[in-house]
């Protein structure tokens, strides 16, 4: 049951990310990451914390696929994302 719920949650997250279009702003990426990071910090038990971590990691992987950090044309985008995420840490 728990694996089913986790699978549905991951699928839903990936679905919404993929449907959000190709144009993510650095601010929107940072905001989403901060929200997911806050879920990890506020998790009340190990299971919830692990689920939140997986959700955050899946988001990170999806964004990295869309905007590879090793691609020079994305340097400004990632600099801004990093600048914005520092505000929530």
Image (cartoon, grey):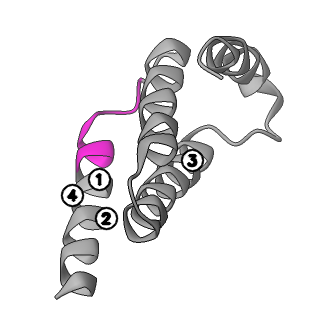
Badge 4 marks a residue whose secondary structure is helix
Marks 2/1 in contact by CB < 8 Å: the verdict is yes
Along the polypeptide, which appears first: circle 1 or circle 3?
1
Relative vertical location of residue 52 with respect to residue 63 in this rendering, above or below: below
| The residue stretch that appears in magenta | 16-23
Residue 18 colored magenta?
yes
| Residue identifier under label 1 | 13
Residue 71 point in image, percent of width and height = 79, 37
- Residue situated in front as seen by the camera: 44 or 85: 44
Please name the residue shown 57% across and 47% down the image.
60
Q: Quadrant of the C terminus?
A: top right
The quadrant holding residue 87 is top right
Cα separation between marks 4 and 2: 5 Å
- 21 sits left or right of 66 in the view: left
The secondary element bearing badge 1 is classed as helix
* Residue 81 in picture, x, y percent from top left: 64, 20
In the rendered view, tell whether residue 55 sits above or below residue 33: below
Which label sits on residue 12? 4
Please report whichever mark, 4 or 3, sits nearer to the chain's N-terminal start. Answer: 4
Q: Position of residue 18 (x, y in %)?
A: 31, 47
Q: For the residues labelled 4 and 2, say whether their Cβ atoms are less than 8 Å apart.
A: yes
The answer to whether mark 1 and mark 4 are in CB contact below 8 A is: yes
Which residue position is annotated with label 3? 60
Image quadrant in which you'd find residue 7? bottom left
The answer to which of marks 3 and 2 sits earlier in the sequence is 2
Q: Say if mark 4 contacts mark 3, CB within 8 Å.
A: no
């Amino acid at each position: 049951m728990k694996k089913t719920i986790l699978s549905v949650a991951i699928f839903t997250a990936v679905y919404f990310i993929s449907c959000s279009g190709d144009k993510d702003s650095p601010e929107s990426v940072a905001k989403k990451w901060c929200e997911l990071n806050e879920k990890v910090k506020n998790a009340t038990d190990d299971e919830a914390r692990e689920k939140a971590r997986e959700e955050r990691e899946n988001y990170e992987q999806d964004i990295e696929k869309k905007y590879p950090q090793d691609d020079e044309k994305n340097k400004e985008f990632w600099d801004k994302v990093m600048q914005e995420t520092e505000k929530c840490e």
